[in-house]
Image (cartoon, helix red, strand yellow):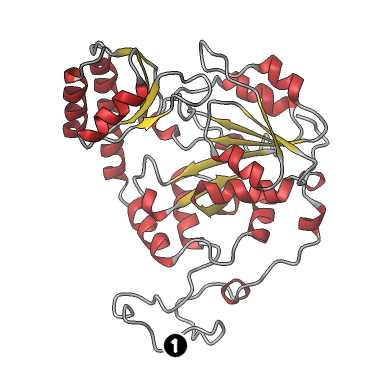
Amino acid sequence: MNSNFDINNLVMDNIKQLYPYLSARKEYRFNQKAIFLDANENSFGSPLSSLNSYHRYPDPLQIELKHKIAEIKNISYSKIFLGNGSDEIIDIIYRIFSQPMRDNSIIFPPTYGMYEVSGKIHGVDVIKVSLIKETYQLNIKQIIKNINSNSKIIFICSPNNPTGNNLKKEDIETIIEKFNGIIVLDEAYIDFSNQESFYKKIDKYPNLIILHTLSKSWGLAGLRIGIAIASEAIIQWMNKIKSPYNINKISQQLAIQALENKDLFFYNLKKIISERNYMSLALQTIPIVHKVYPSDANFLLVQLSCSTNKFYKYLLKHNIIVRDRSQIALCNNCLRITIGTNEENKYLIKQMQQYEYK
């Protein structure tokens, strides 16, 4: 890592010059006991006001929720940004650090599709350096060859989606240390893995942004809460351009309740990992399964020896929905199967055993 690294050198000029919109709740630090006559709300409440004060705007900086997350992760809340899902965070990162029609980002397919989609939406060239076919690991030599003066963001997903495997820790650190742009390390599935998160290294690597989420291991996908962990300098830029009230009040409240129930979280986490192990072994006994890839996530990538499309439609007829990944890079004839409950998993195995193909 270049000792002269300065995050401000990467920020777009229009973002530096931007005077951010200040919502009423952002100008006044949140205090539920205050008399709010500042935001043109309905002071008489709503039909739901007997349950809660939904006629008031939510805390735009989600301070209480951030404190709860900071407590769990043992970091300062000022190093946390919350987005309407990780997709909003990815979008914001592009807006801050990439000049449309000039800059590029680098991704490593097969990987999460929104890195590319968001880049294209912003008019940023997306350079693809495929993972190594045999191992689904990073191709360090090819990555370094493809970095140029207009490379501003690199997206790394570990455990990777859709392959499910951890990327080598030393390879990730090599890229972080050799790249003077922004490194986005997406760890959405890290709780299902034995690999330690990189978020404890953000002080060492000021160009590093870690993505976590409440959608996977915490089981709160419907609340749409993505988490970015980074230096305070980066978090300040993200807060500057985000939508005023990007996390609604109900999502904030329910997330806080869920985070207080850590015992249930760990109980469910253990069950998912146990079911993953069961599914990995059970799938390998089925004739149409060519390979079950090792997984550090809550899903398995499964390669079939039959037509993926026909088998996918067969499962649909039996009310089983999986993800057909056969059309993306290095995933020929592959399905991505999320780990379900024991009952759901056994039903899937039974239907797969009964499948006949020619």
The residue depicted at 20 percent of the width and 19 percent of the height is 355
The residue depicted at 48 percent of the width and 28 percent of the height is 159
Q: Residues within 10 Å of mark 1 (few under 14, many from 20)?
A: few
> Quadrant of the image for the C terminus?
top left
The residue depicted at 44 percent of the width and 88 percent of the height is 43
**Disc 1 designates what residue?**
43
The residue depicted at 61 percent of the width and 37 percent of the height is 116
In terms of image quadrants, where is residue 186? top right
Residue 26 in percent (x, y) is at 60, 71
Residue 63 in percent (x, y) is at 51, 62
Would you place residue 283 above or below residue 246 in this image?
Answer: above
Q: Amino acid at mark 1?
A: Ser
Locate residue 346 relative to residue 103 in the image: left or right: left
> Can the viewer see residue 271 in this picture?
no
- Judged from the image, the secondary structure of the residue bearing numbered disc 1 is loop
Residue 31 in percent (x, y) is at 50, 75
Q: How many marks?
A: 1
Of all residues, the one furthest to the front in this rendering is 358
> Quadrant of the image for the N terminus?
top right
Locate residue 316 relative to residue 216 in the image: left or right: left
Locate residue 308 relative to residue 267 in the image: left or right: right
Residue 213 in percent (x, y) is at 46, 44
Would you place residue 141 above or below residue 147 in this image?
Answer: above
> Can the viewer see residue 227 in this picture?
yes
Would you place residue 228 above or below residue 106 in this image?
Answer: below
**Which residue occupies the foreground of this view, 33 or 284?**
284
